[in-house]
Image (cartoon, grey):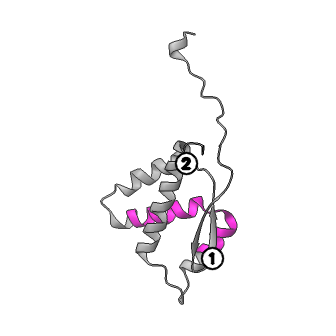
Amino acid sequence: MTANRFKDFGAPEVAEKDPIVFKLFNQEFSCAPAIQGKIMLDLVADSASEDNAKSAATIIKFITSVLLDESLERFLVLTESKDKIVSVETLGDISAWLVEQYTARPNQQPEA
């Protein structure tokens, strides 16, 4: 096998071990410290849709796929509450912030 026709991508380790945390209605929600690249690619592909319903579903799918189990349960209860309203804009802000966290982490420089 020639060297230019084969590449071993190995098993890269996730450098970040701490969860990503956000707060909403005085509750902290923990998300996975790293996610599969496919989740991000699906988000990009689905958010480019002209179908508003598909774009909206993409935000919820993304957030629920990154939340850790215990946080996911509480998040779903909160977002279905009749008393505490989580607006579409807030869900979009959460999603955008999470995307920023996931895409920025691999490129962060170590602190000096």
Q: Position of residue 1 (x, y in %)?
A: 58, 10
The image position of residue 4, as x and y in percent, is 50, 14
* Dot 1: element: strand
Residue occupying the far bottom of the picture: 83
Residue at 45 percent across and 73 percent down: it is 90
In the rendered image of this protein, does residue 55 appear above or below residue 27? above
**Displayed quadrant of residue 12:** top right
Give the residue at x 48% y 55%: 100
Question: Residue drawn 46% across and 51% down?
Answer: 42
Residue 62's tag is none
How far across and down, in percent of the image, does residue 59 sit? 46, 64
The magenta stretch is 55-75
Q: Mark 1 and mark 2 in contact (Cβ < 8 Å)?
A: no
The label on residue 27 is 1
- Mark drawn on residue 105: 2
Q: Which amino acid does label 2 sit on?
A: Arg
Sooner in the amino-acid sequence: mark 2 or mark 1 = 1
Q: Look at label 1 and name its amino acid.
A: Gln
Find the distance from the CA under tag 2 to the CA under tag 1.
24 Å
Examine the image and state in which quarter residue 71 appears: bottom right
Image quadrant containing the C terminus: top right
Q: Residue 6 occupies which quadrant of the picture?
A: top right
12 versus 41 height, above or below: above
Secondary structure of residue under mark 2: helix
Q: Indicate left or right for 86 with 22 as reference.
A: left
Q: Judge left or right: residue 61 versus residue 26.
A: left
- What percent of the width, then of the height, locates residue 23? 58, 72
Nearer-the-camera pick, 101 or 55: 101
